[in-house]
Image (tube, grey):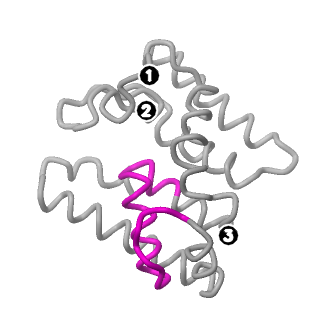
Amino acid sequence: DLAHRSLDAARVVAAAARQPMTTPFTSWLAFLARWEGHESDDPHDRGGRTVYGISSAAHPDVDLDRLTPAGVAKIARESYWQPCACDALPPRVAVALADYAWHSSVETAVRDLQRCVGALPDGRVGPLTLAAVRAVDRDLALALALNERRRERLRVIGQRPGQARFLRGWL
């Protein structure tokens, strides 16, 4: 039920805050819990029913009725954080990239980061992408990646104006 899921989300945030050394991944999880820590089934959301930010469209194999914060963390790490090679990126770039991937796709987020840093935009993070990220100023890489995310989300809204209601959560 909604109250129970909101309480679980609050527990995820509190647990992340209590950790002596918060990692970029746990910081991102806490951020997700604040924004995604509820259940929704908005008819305008192309993702369909969503629990803790896990949508039935993106994760049809997940039983949303049995999803727990630990399950969300596993999905977040295995489906977004690791494919984006976030552990090898500067922390703020990692969090921004993983969150962009969460709201679009790993391939889209990585390609946009690659374009920002002058790497071949193949949608996969490898040694050349990591070297390109390291070669630019971290704050510049972050700003460029966030700008690409904003541009991509606005493109989606241009194609599907009904999606504008979700822009605040996407950015």
> The disc labelled 3 sits on which kind of residue?
Pro
Report which residue position mark 3 lands on.
Answer: 90
In the rendered image, residue 120 lying in the magenta stretch gets the answer yes
Labels 1 and 2: the sequence-earlier one: 2
Numbered disc 3: secondary structure? loop
> The disc labelled 1 sits on which kind of residue?
Val
Q: Which residue appears at 62% of the width and 31% of the height?
A: 10
- Badge 2 crowding class, 10 Å Cα cut-off, few under 14, some 14 to 19, many 20 or more, is many
> The disc labelled 2 sits on which kind of residue?
Ile
Q: Which residue appears at 67% of the width and 28% of the height?
A: 11
Numbered disc 1: secondary structure? loop
Report which residue position mark 1 lands on.
Answer: 62
Callout 1–callout 2 Cβ contact below 8 Å: yes
User: Which region of the structure is painted magenta?
Assistant: 98-125
- Badge 1 crowding class, 10 Å Cα cut-off, few under 14, some 14 to 19, many 20 or more, is some
Report which residue position mark 2 lands on.
Answer: 54
Q: Position of residue 115 (x, y in %)?
A: 41, 78
